[in-house]
Image (cartoon, rainbow, N blue to C red):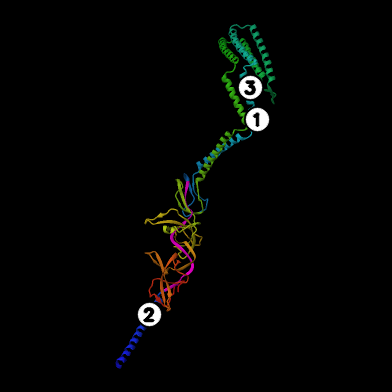
Amino acid sequence: MMFIKRYKWIFVVVLVLLVAGLGALFLRGRGQQMAAAESDTETAVAFIGDLAESATASGQVSAVHEAALSLQSSGKVTAVAVQVGDAVSKGDVLVQLDTTDLERAVASAEYDLAIAEAQLAELTEDPSSEELVAAEAAVNSAQAKLNDLLNGPTDDEIAASEAGVQAAQAQVWAASGNVTAAEDVSEADIAAAQKALDDALDEQKSAHDAWVDLAICKVGDDGVYSCVPKQDNDKMDAATETIQRANAQVAIKQAQLDELLNPDANQVASSEAGVGSASAAYDAAVARHEELLAGASDAEIAAAEADLASAEASLDKLLNGPQQTDITIYETRVAQAQTALQQAQNNLQDATLKAPFDGLITAINVSPGEYASGVAAEMMSMDNLEIILSVDEVDVGKLAIGQPAVVTLETWPDVQLESAITAIDPQASANSNGAVSYDVHLGLPESDLPILVGMTANADLLTDNRKGVLLVPNAAIHPDRQNGTYSVFIVQRDEQGALETVPVTVEIGLKDNQFTQIVSGLNVGDEVLLGTLSAPTTMSGFGSGQPGTR
């Protein structure tokens, strides 16, 4: 019995030792596992910081100012002043067309404008005293003529007309007498003819003296008198008619005496012809006399009234100035001439193609001697460069003019250039794969780098910015794509001091290539596990991590 009890205690002792050994072995393995977890696991602490979200895109360096320069007129190229690659300044001549015809057109337009301006000035300038006197005299003369027609012939005019008829009758008688005298000439006839001539000369002198008394006479440097008849003087008109009759009588008497003194074999035939001519003159004188007695016709009166109205209108225009309609007409002519001159000058200027800004010539499309039009040269400005990025439609909605960006060039990948968005094209472009993108323009700041057009550029575009928000490293975030949720593993210490991880669902905000904003689910100072679990959930240590990690 005692033997059995002794072995029972031995069994208990062995059992205790066995349990103790197994426990030690278990604790040794657990320690090794926790040591492994401690060496392979990283954690981080949620902290408050700033976060900027960005989108990346690539593009090329382009010139802001590029121009395809066209000739505004066609013509023969006389000179090409530049070559591809030449640096030019604003206003430099690039291509010159022949200007011979264009210069002639400008000269003609200048002449037309000068004439139009002179006509307008003449229309609007004040009249001279001589012009006013002449216009008034024209009105008086036209009025007097109309009055004469309306009042009929005066006694003096009738007498003068009758005298003209008588003189014509005398011519007929004289011509008839010549026919007779050609056949029989006596001394008495010659004496009578001489007496008649002397009497006619006396009458001619008397008429001449009376005319001179009524005329305006001046003595020249040579002592010779020169006389002009007074205008609008009825006595002067009668004196003029009287002297005309006296001159005719002298001519007749002289002709009669000459015929008597110098008989001719052809005298009879000539005298008979003279009778016919004198008879025709007599008939004409009688017709004029009858017309004078009949008075003016309606047509003559109407013509005289029209002449008077025209003279009065001319005088009124001088006194009161031109009408506004006339001024408008002449001003319009001046304006048209100015427009024509401006167009001619523009055409002349267009024959010279000049650089619109400082830059480099990239293409020349014409040669001297050829007839050219259209695009003649191309150039770009190297003083103002930009970067044109192709941004996916998914990201373009987050962009706005003025947003900052960081640019690097493939040629100098380690050099970062600060920039900003200057423009976003309103129309998208699609590539061969059907992807839709938009051109986004960035300003290229001044740099010592020898940047060339066409270089490849990469840019980080800042799309959003948060300051003073709760952040954790991106490696702490575990997305659930199926449910659209996100979670993190919070590292905690249990009652025995061991560490364990607890999954927590969180709401995230912005993220960059390092950190993610936590909107809800964590607090400042919470320790989170980085990466995927590779050790038991209960741990005794922390690994090292990135900034903010333990």
Magenta residues span 42-71
Give how far across and how far down residue 365 sits, in percent. 44, 49
Q: Is residue 346 above or below residue 307?
A: below
Question: Which of the pair 322/497 is nearer the observer?
Answer: 497
Asked if residue 65 is among those painted magenta in the image, a careful observer would answer yes
Q: Would you say the residues marked 2 and 1 are in contact, meaning their CB atoms lie under 8 Å apart? A: no
Q: Upstream in the sequence, badge 3 or badge 2?
A: 2
Give how far across and how far down residue 52 sits, in percent. 47, 64
How much space separates mark 2 and mark 1, taking CA atoms? 136 Å
Give how far across and how far down residue 149 sits, in percent. 61, 19
> Callout 3, which amino acid?
Ala
Residue receiving disc 3: 144
Asked if residue 154 is among those painted magenta in the image, a careful observer would answer no
Of circles 2 and 1, which is in front? 2
Disc ID at residue 130: 1
Assign the N terminus to one quadrant of the image. Answer: bottom left
Q: Residues within 10 Å of mark 1 (few under 14, many from 20)?
A: few
Question: Which of the pair 189/434 is nearer the observer?
Answer: 434
Q: Upstream in the sequence, badge 1 or badge 3?
A: 1
SS at badge 1: helix
Question: Which of the pair 496/269 is nearer the observer?
Answer: 496
Query: Can residue 363 be spotted in the picture?
Result: yes
Give how far across and how far down residue 38 sits, in percent. 41, 77
Task: Choose top left, top right, bottom left or bottom right for residue 253.
Answer: top right
SS at badge 2: helix
Q: Residue at x 44, y 56 (%)?
A: 439
> Callout 1, which amino acid?
Glu
Query: Can residue 515 be spotted in the picture?
Result: no
Residue receiving disc 2: 30
Of circles 3 and 2, which is in front? 2
Q: Residue at x 52, y 45 (%)?
A: 349
